[in-house]
Image: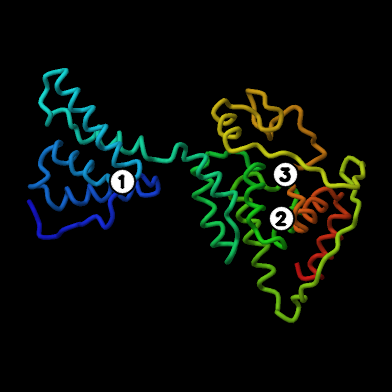
Amino acid sequence: MSTNAKIKLKTKFDGNANRVREITKHCDWKFALDPTTFDTNFKKSIYLLSCCEGGTAGPWAVEYSDTLDKASMATGAKVEDVFDWNKVKKAFIDYFSPVSQVSSAISAMRILKQTGTVKEYIAAFRPLREQSNITEVAVLRDYFLDGLKDGLAYKIISIDPATIKTFEDLYGAAERLDEVYQSRPKKEQPSKTTYRPPVRYQSRGGRSFGRFKTIRRLTDNEREKMMKEGRCFRCRQVGHMARECPNGDSNHSYVRQVDTNTPADKVRAIINGLDDEAKKEAIESLENQGF
């Protein structure tokens, strides 16, 4: 039964992948409100194709329509029967959706930054993690810390990695540490000054480093390929994950990539390499300096 309600598409679809879901939902709602007009697969299909104009969408709609017309002529089937709504809708989604939801989610995590509360940051980070299909807590920890404010990130780095076994453990640790800091009276919260880290630090293995150790991070394509093949991010072999890697060093926690272009990353790299006693002193110093 048709209704008087009308839904109009504000702008035609030009191929923008971010609007794919908007367009398909628009069609679903329009057909539901006016089932009398859109009572066949052919009418529904033609309407969707008519929404495509300009950019890459216009040429695709014309070419796809021509392909179906030729299929009708080759098989002798009626044109109306060839334009199957479900198939046309699927072809539209497959052609214009992002190449990889996994890659898109990982890219979004890489640029996500905490601008408000920790809870708001986690709320934005959580769905991206789910879409990324990342199952390694150590890998997620790297992305998660990159977006946190430096003061909170340093405190999480000081936590024993063995106590963070799940994603929820990581989120919970961030919330607890932030609540502790926020609950402190303002008069006890020190003013911010510049923290100057020591030039050298001692690793848990006893070796000292005068420079920062930089580790190349996998690209999005490499990471996605390795996840599909079931390869370990640490040794690149098939059959186990990074946390179970036989080549891992039990004396070292997960080592994150360091971007030595910023002072904050240099400080983070230094603290991550300290032994437990020195790390505690560094964290206390940071807190006293307002970080």
Instruction: Say which quadrant the C terminus sits in.
Output: bottom right
Dot 3 alpha-carbon crowd within 10 angstroms: few under 14, some 14 to 19, many 20 or more: some
Dot 2 alpha-carbon crowd within 10 angstroms: few under 14, some 14 to 19, many 20 or more: some
Circle 2: residue type = Ile
Q: Is residue 80 above or below residue 54?
A: above
Separation (CA) of disc 3 from disc 2: 16 Å
From the image, tell me which residue sits under label 2. Answer: 156
| Dot 2: element | helix
Q: Residue at x 23, y 41 (%)?
A: 49
* Foreground disc of the pair 1, 3: 1
Q: Position of residue 60 (x, y in %)?
A: 30, 36
From the image, tell me which residue sits under label 3. Answer: 257
Circle 3: residue type = Gln
Separation (CA) of disc 1 from disc 3: 42 Å
Circle 1: residue type = Gly
* Foreground disc of the pair 3, 2: 3
Q: Earlier in the sequence, mark 2 or mark 1?
A: 1
Q: Residue at x 65, y 42 (%)?
A: 139
Snapshot quadrant of residue 281: bottom right
The numbered disc on residue 54 is 1
Q: Residue at x 36, y 49 (%)?
A: 19
